[in-house]
Amino acid sequence: MASVAKETIYAPPPGPPPPRSHIAPPAASATTPGTATQPPLTQLLPTNSPIPLDHLSLAGWYPIPLSNPEYEPIHKAYSDLFALSEAFFALPDTSPEKTDHRPTPANKLLEKGPKSWHTEDGWSMIPGEKQLLSVRHARHAPLGDVREGLAKAWKVTGPFLHGIMKNIALSVGLGEGVFDEMIEPCLILPGSEGEDGEVDASPTLMRMFRYDRPVATVDSEGEGEPGVEPKIVSEAHRDLGLITLVIGHSPGLEVFYPPSFNAPQGAWLPIEEEELEEGLSSADGLTATIMTGEALARLTNRRYRPGMHRVLVHPDEQPYRFSLVYALRPASSAVLTTETFQSAVTGLYPDAAKLEGKTGGVLMNDIASRLFNVNIGVEKREAQKRRMAEAKLVAEED
């Protein structure tokens, strides 16, 4: 995941967040963002999507009812993977299951892969924030139960998100198969089914996270109630790809609710908290949230906004928060053209957003070059922010 270098994030307004009954889309602009001369566009077209696409398009996120029987395969796969994830992260940091799967050095990257993706292969840790295992190929995970669990979760999640992408295509007036070329190569974890020969890593990835909760504090004499100061362990950011599924086992994920009539500056919503969700997406303690990414925003001329989110954890009896993420990204070889994605709903693409001459890999490289990575060390992250701020100043001067 990555985030913009200079992002204006407003503090939540006074009082509690909007009640669950008000999770409804904010008012939509009549013109496509960034194109002041565009005529008014039609609304999203109706589809049979299991989630409300009007909300998803405008907010960039929506919780799904994981307790519904139709989601049982996802619930089962991720319940099993959570148990495996907890056991994996409990291993010593010097264990070969971790150290043998460190991120790939940049000079060993496949030429087709985006330059920043070497941070997305294998196990890594950021002291004081998190440990994570990032998997784009079976070789990035240790042999055995963890690898098998990731492959099973991947196999049920890919088709589920592909179905949502078909409805998204229909909602903007495109054929339901318009995204197939960039999605179908990514539906199976590469290397997990005994493929013949060398198989490239996928741009799509799964991640297992273990976030460190803050340590409870007491006064200087060792007395008093434990402190309740929360801690941000993943800065506010938007995902790079098309669409993401986040499964949580305890509260921590917060999504940004765009400005609306009852929250004029927008608000952070703790989407995994039971009192907000009213059981909508909870099943045996697990929650599920769909989020849209920057690639989908580009391909739909920003009719679908990327969802802003962060992870904020509170002290708890349990020292860690675990989560599992599946990020669907366009296949690197997929050929893109503006005409393919332009419709009466998306409107005309501004020159800077046109897709001619790009592939899925080029698009992802372009997006990644404009964002900083929230899953690398703090010093490197801050250096990325500084470089991008300097580049922005140079561009503005030109």
Image (cartoon, rainbow, N blue to C red):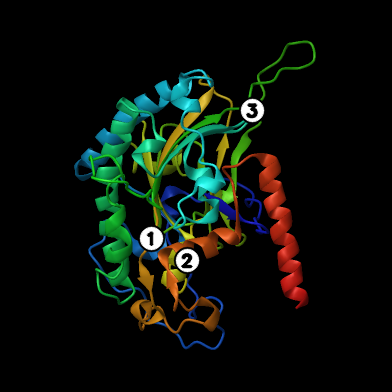
Residue at numbered disc 1: 330
Frontmost residue, 112 versus 62: 112
The disc label shown at residue 228, or none: 3
Please state the horizontal and vertical placement of residue 174, each as a whole percent of the image. Answer: 29, 75
Frontmost residue, 36 versus 108: 108
Residue at numbered disc 2: 363
Q: Residues within 10 Å of mark 3 (few under 14, many from 20)?
A: some
- Helix, strand or loop under label 3: loop
Rendering quarter of residue 22:
bottom left
Residue at (54, 23) in percent of width and height: 316
Spatial CA span between label 3 and label 2: 42 Å
Quadrant in the picture for the C terminus: bottom right
For badge 1, the amino acid type reads Pro
Between circles 3 and 2, the one closer to the viewer is 2
Q: Is residue 101 above or below residue 87?
A: below
For badge 3, the amino acid type reads Val
Residue lying farthest left?
69
